[in-house]
Image (tube, helix red, strand yellow):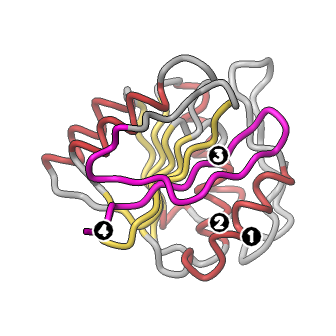
């Protein structure tokens, strides 16, 4: 796994031993960032279930202003920090070892808002629905913000969203990217 383009282009990222994380496949990541295009420039990014930091670090390499990484696993947090050093992007990063829903509540109280939120939780464990419900009730998105879920075909997004809407869905075999924005009107 490597950074595809930008200031850290070609940097190989450290990945954990075993199967506790499921890094985003390079072809899915490349498609995702082609879709995002110039939206990355100067964005405030939140990378939930960060794993290796692959998505947030790619965003920083492509010109995002700042990225916050959250993972509950201490080994993953260590790898994110190491990968930030490898890419020479540490000054633009914050890394938290915490439960995703707890840190989102903290960010809500701190009134922190993000332009792009990557959410790549373990597949088929209900995390997509829980995180989406939180954002629907307490949006941490800036007005033109984007919440991007990487999930399994079997992880269904709720259809009863009030403040958010699903704008785009892309399929890559078993993997799905769902793009969620603030509902207008």
Q: Nearer the viewer, mark 3 or mark 1?
A: 1
Label 1 sits on a secondary structure element that is: loop
Q: Nearer the viewer, mark 1 or mark 4?
A: 4
Q: How would you rate the neighbour count of disc 4 (Cα within 10 Å): few for under 14, some for 14-19, many for 20 or more?
A: few
Q: Nearer the viewer, mark 2 or mark 1?
A: 1
Q: CA distance from mark 2 to mark 4?
A: 38 Å
Q: Position of residue 160 (x, y in %)?
A: 34, 38
Check residue 122 for magenta coloring: no
Label 3 sits on a secondary structure element that is: helix
Circle nearer the N terminus (3, 2): 3
Check residue 167 for magenta coloring: yes
Q: Nearer the viewer, mark 3 or mark 4?
A: 4
Residue under pointer 3: 82
Residue under pointer 4: 184
Q: CA distance from mark 2 to mark 1?
A: 7 Å
Q: Which residues are magenta?
A: 160-185
Q: Are marks 3 and 2 in contact (CB under 8 Å)?
A: no
Q: Name the mark on residue 129.
A: none
Label 4 sits on a secondary structure element that is: loop
Between residue 52 and residue 129, name the one nearer to us. Answer: 129
Circle nearer the N terminus (2, 1): 1
Q: CA distance from mark 1 to mark 4?
A: 36 Å
Q: Position of residue 68 (x, y in %)?
A: 44, 53
Circle nearer the N terminus (1, 4): 1
Q: How would you rate the neighbour count of disc 3 (Cα within 10 Å): few for under 14, some for 14-19, many for 20 or more?
A: some
Residue under pointer 1: 8
């Amino acid at each position: 796994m490597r950074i595809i383009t930008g200031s850290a282009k070609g940097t190989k990222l450290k990945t954990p031993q075993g199967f506790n994380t499921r890094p985003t496949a390079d072809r899915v990541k490349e498609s995702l960032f082609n879709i995002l295009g110039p939206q990355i420039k100067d964005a405030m990014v939140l990378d939930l279930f960060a794993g290796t930091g692959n998505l947030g670090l790619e965003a920083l390499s492509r010109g995002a202003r700042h990225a916050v990484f959250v993972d509950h696993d201490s080994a993953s947090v260590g790898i994110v920090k190491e990968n930030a050093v490898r890419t020479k992007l540490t000054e633009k990063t914050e890394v938290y070892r915490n439960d995703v829903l707890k840190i989102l509540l903290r960010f809500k109280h701190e009134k922190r808002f993000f332009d792009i939120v990557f959410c790549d939780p373990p597949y088929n464990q209900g995390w997509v629905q829980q995180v989406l419900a939180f954002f629907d009730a307490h949006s941490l998105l800036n007005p033109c913000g984007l919440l991007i879920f990487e999930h399994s075909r079997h992880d269904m997004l709720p259809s009863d969203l009030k403040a958010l809407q699903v704008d785009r869905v892309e399929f890559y075999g078993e993997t799905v990217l769902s793009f969620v924005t603030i509902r207008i009107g």
